[in-house]
Amino acid sequence: MANAGPGVIALHSGYPAEELLPTRLVRSALVRAARTNTAVERAPISGLPELRSWFAAELAPAGASVAAPPAADDVVITPGGQSALSSIFRALANPGDAIVMESPTYWGAMAAARQAGLRIVPIARGTTAPTAADLDDALGASGARLFYAQPHFANPTGALWSSSERSAITAVLHARGAYLIEDDWAHDFGIDADAAPLAADDADGHIVYVRSLTKSLSPAVRVAAVVARGPALARIQVDRTVDDLYVSGILQAAAVDVLTDPGWRSHLSRLRGSLRGRRDEMARQVRGQLGADALELVPRGGLNLWVRTNDGVDVAGLARRAAAEGVLFSPGGDWFPAEPTGSFFRLNYSRARPELFEPAVGILARLLA
C-alpha cells in the first residue's frame, strides 16, 4: 500500500483518520498501563483474562437464546486480525486444501490463505451475500471445510447479509460440517445498521469469529481476538503459541482500559455520525461526477465505497495516473480471488478530509472522460 505524502489525497487507506479515533482515551490508557505490572511481566499465552471476558461478553447479548454463549475460555488474543486469520488458516486446514471465499473479498485474507498453501475457491458476491446454492456447490465440489466471509459491511463492497441469507448460509455449513470464518472487521463502524455477529448464535462451534480493535482504537494497538470452540480452538491455541507465544501485555491492558471507559460508548456514537457524513458526501460526489450508476450500493456501515466504471477500463493504469496527480485509491482487481467480474475500484471515506472528496473525485472523472 502506497504511503500518502504531503498534498496527496489518500482514498486508499484502510485506517480511519486520527480525528475518528479515541485518541485521548488511548493515550491515557497507555500511560496508565505502563505504570502497572504489565510493563514488566509476560502476558498469559491466551491473553489477559479481563480482555478475553470483554470479547466474550460482546457476543453474549445477541446470543442470549443460546444455551452456552461464548465464554472467556473460548477467546484467544492475537496481535491483530491479519495474524488471527493466518493462524486460523494454518490450524484448520492443510497445505493443498481448498477454502471457499466470497469474490470480491479482503485481499489480506487471500494472501494469508495462499501463504498457508490453501487453494481458494471463489463464489460470487455483489450487493448481497453469496447464494446458499453456490456455497453448497463450492463446498461439495472442492471438499473445502472452511468458508471465509465478512457478513457485515464487507471489505471492499460494503454489503451486509440479510437475516434470511444468514440462516440459509448457516444451514449449508451445518449440513456440510464446515466452518465459517467470520471476519467482523467493521463491528465498530455501523452507520445505519449494527453488526450482529453470527457467532453469537453458534451453539455447536461451526463458526470461528475474528474481531480486531486496530482500526477502531489505534493502528498502534495491534490487538484482536479469535473466538472458537472445541478442537478448532485447541488447534488455533497451539498455532498462536508457536507463532507469537503471547501478545504485549501493555497493549492488552490499554485496550481493556479504553473499552471499559464510559467515554468509549460516547466515542462510538460520535463516530457513527462522522462516518455517516463522510459516506454521504463521498457518495454524492461519486454519483454526481462519475454517474448515477457508479454505485451499486451505499453501504450501511464500514469505511469504503465500491465504485464500478465502464467495463474495459484499465483501472490499474487509472490508479497510476491518479497517483501522479495526487489521488490514491485501491484498484478493484486486488480484491478478486479470480478474474474480476468488471472494472471496479475502492474509495475509502474515513481517511482524507471530506472537503477533499470533491476535487479528488473530480480528478478521477477527468481521467476517465
Image (cartoon, grey):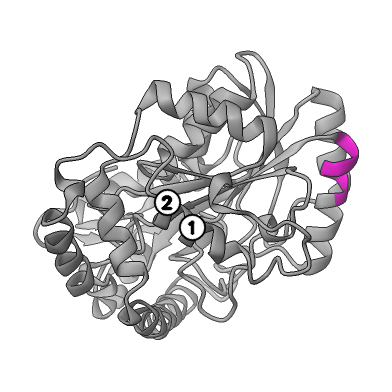
Q: Residue 327 occupies which quadrant of the picture?
A: bottom left
The foreground one among 83 and 353 is 83
How many C-alpha atoms fall within 10 Å of the one at disc 2: few (<14), some, or many (≥20)? some
* Residue at image coords 31%, 81%: 263
Marks 2/1: CA distance?
6 Å
Residue 191 spot, x, y in % from top left: 51, 78
Residue 202 spot, x, y in % from top left: 74, 53
- Give the amino acid at mark 1: Ser
Query: Is residue 117 on the magenta stretch?
Result: no
The secondary structure making up most of the magenta span is helix
Instruction: Report the quarter where the N terminus lies.
Output: top left
User: Does residue 134 show up?
Assistant: no
Q: What SS does tag 2 mark?
A: helix
* Residue at image coords 46%, 68%: 188
134 horizontally vs 99: left or right: right
* Residue at image coords 52%, 60%: 306
Residue 33 spot, x, y in % from top left: 18, 57
Q: In this picture, which residue range is highlighted in magenta?
A: 171-176
User: Does residue 265 show up?
Assistant: yes
The residue where tag 2 is placed is: 49
Instruction: Report the quarter where the C terminus lies.
Output: bottom left
The residue where tag 1 is placed is: 53
Q: Residue 295 occupies which quadrant of the picture?
A: bottom right
* Residue at image coords 24%, 44%: 2
